[in-house]
Amino acid sequence: MKRSRFLLFMIFGFLVITLSACGSRGSGSGSGSTAVYPRFAYVANFGDNTISVYTVDASTGQLRHNGYVATGSFPEFVTVDPSGKFAYTANWGDNTISVYTINQTTGALTAGTAVAAGLNPVSVTVDPSGKFAYAANLSSNNISVYTINQTTGALTAGTPAAAGTSPWSVTVDPSGKFAYDANVSDNTISVYTINQTTGALTAGTPVPAGTEPYSVTVDLSGKFAYAANLGSNNISVYTINQTTGALTAGTPVAAGTNPHSVTVDPSGKFAYVANEGSNNISVYTIDQTTGALTAGTPVAAGTNPISIMVDPSGKFAYAANLNDNTISVYTIDQTTGALTAGTAVAAGTHTRFVTVDPSGRFAYAANEGGTISVYTINQTSGALTAGTPVSAGTYPTSITVDPSGKFAYATNYDSSNISVYTIDQTTGALTAGTPVAAGTEPASVIVDPSGRFAYAANLGSGTISVYTLDQTTGALTAVGTPVTARTAPVSVTVDPSGKFVYVANEGSNNISVYTIDQTTGALIAVETVGAGMDTFSVTVDPSGKFAYAANWSDDTIWVYTINQTSGILTVVGSPLIAGTAPESVTVDSSGRFAYVANAESNNISVYTIDQTTGALTAVGTPVAAGTNPISVVTTGAIQ
């Protein structure tokens, strides 16, 4: 029964919808009709024991990487309580449930104390009141029952309830009175009533489903239930007795091949099924009187989609694709329920250079003399307090922090390697690990938004080193041989979607464009696009729509739009005159403002960004800086 997978859920403001591979609507199911907008999304990555964190564009539904956090062994499922304060992960490999608190501003997860579950827990769900949680334990054939501490999110175990054979998912009806479990191996749906004081489950009479039911869900009215039957390629339809919770079977409807997950949109008008075997999503309209399903036109997904969910606004749908490690994004036709595919996303810079960790608590500076300075940031005033510096290699030129905030990496120009550090989560102190070889004269390093890959621009050898990142230790492992860039690559960056890499080639006055292999991290060359004289850096805005190149010798900033499919850059307008010797461009987290460090005029230029074209408009006169400023870093919550 062990199957590699990753499962998806989203937080929308303070409301949640948890429609993972199990189709559970347990948490937040009573609030889905409210037209609130998404803020954060999370994906449980079975293969690397992490949860990926995303921010969500409220207008387009597009997902953007925002780091990751470690889980237990082989996480199968992640869910959130209705308040949006706590998250829980079912860890198949070590028989635990991980507990996290959620930063309401950034979406970041902070681990609490994990609790024991049964054997091979494959899903966890929270009831609509946020008081109880339930985990389906595949190999012990039972359901773990927990009460939730309303202040900390901690779980306290109650008495497990017997289930059928190989329980795979639990869902709770919107009233919080009844629970249902899909049992894969005996082809049944278990029915329970919930004790409103203790959360204890009392079993009712199971009902037959199709072959291998993997998912069961209840619509928001609490009148109908649906089960996705992987082995018989259909969806079981039930009406729910509003007094007892008992299920009465209706007529099953055909699905695609190996339907793995079923969900209902917040309006209760449409249902969607992720078909693992046929790589598509089935679309249905729901008869509001009987609950019967009428099939519409299926839409293509990625490879082996195993879960599908709809955001509470009812505007967007997301499918988690098992074998190409992507999330398909769709917009929903509000009249017909039809799905239109958007851009899929991957799952799961520089005394010389300064960077801030993702939490905004710590700052680090790469000092040419061979050290990294460490600072804590006053959260009220922004003032820096120095900690203990740490040794780097010879002539460190840049430092970056991975999206989880656990690891830091510094390029050592003269020793041609990358220093690796772990970050103390309380103090920000750095502990050195084993350096890894780079090319000749590495000038900058970046970690992709998913935290899986790292890239270093090697100025002397004209190459880009590619690494995989161990998400437990932070260690870097080289992927193949370095990739050829143009002359003197000095800066490397990854777009927010994690699909494209851009390299500023100082010696050849251009930008190299690559796509990222989402499995290995390898780079595939797309094009080289012209820039100004001595291109020192390239920056992508948080939306991933625009790129900016700082050109040292002709004092210009070039603006580009980014093709969201290919990553290709198109120049916008004429080059913009900045200060003298602009070395870097920084875009703030809102995507509204850009800052340029002008190394030889000793000032910072400030610009507003046109949200449609990406064009820059100067704000006032440049602001004085110290001598030879070469980089700007901003902090702040993601907008």
Image (cartoon, rainbow, N blue to C red):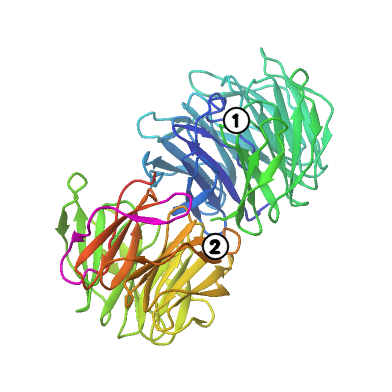
Q: Position of residue 280 (x, y in %)?
A: 74, 48
Q: Nearer the viewer, residue 256 or 333?
A: 333
Foreground label between 1 and 2:
2
Q: Position of residue 345 (x, y in %)?
A: 57, 55
At x 16% / y 70%, what residue is drawn?
A: 627
- Say which element carries label 2: loop
Of mark 1 and mark 2, the one earlier in the sequence is 1
Q: Indicate the amino acid at tag 2.
A: Lys
Quadrant of residue 489 within the rendered picture? bottom left
Q: Position of residue 205 (x, y in %)?
A: 73, 23
Q: Residue furthest front?
A: 574
Q: Which residues are magenta?
A: 610-629
Q: Nearer the viewer, residue 468 or 100?
A: 468
Which image quarter is the C terminus in? top left
The tag on residue 82 is: none
Instruction: Find disc 2 in the rendering and name its residue.
Output: 499
Estimate the spatial distance between the alpha carbons at disc 1 and disc 2, rounded to whole Å.
Answer: 44 Å
Q: Nearer the viewer, residue 209 or 14?
A: 14
The tag on residue 161 is: 1
Can residue 579 be seen by looking at this rendering? yes
Going by the image, does 436 lie left or right of 625? right
Can residue 72 be seen by looking at this rendering? no
Image height of 126 relative to 107, above or below: above
Quadrant of residue 436 within the rendered picture? bottom left
Assess disc 2: are there few (<14), some (14-19) or many (≥20) residues with their C-alpha within 10 Å of its C-alpha: many
Going by the image, does 434 lie left or right of 338? left
Tell me if residue 208 is in the magenta stretch: no
Quadrant of residue 622 within the rendered picture? bottom left
Q: Indicate the amino acid at tag 1.
A: Ala
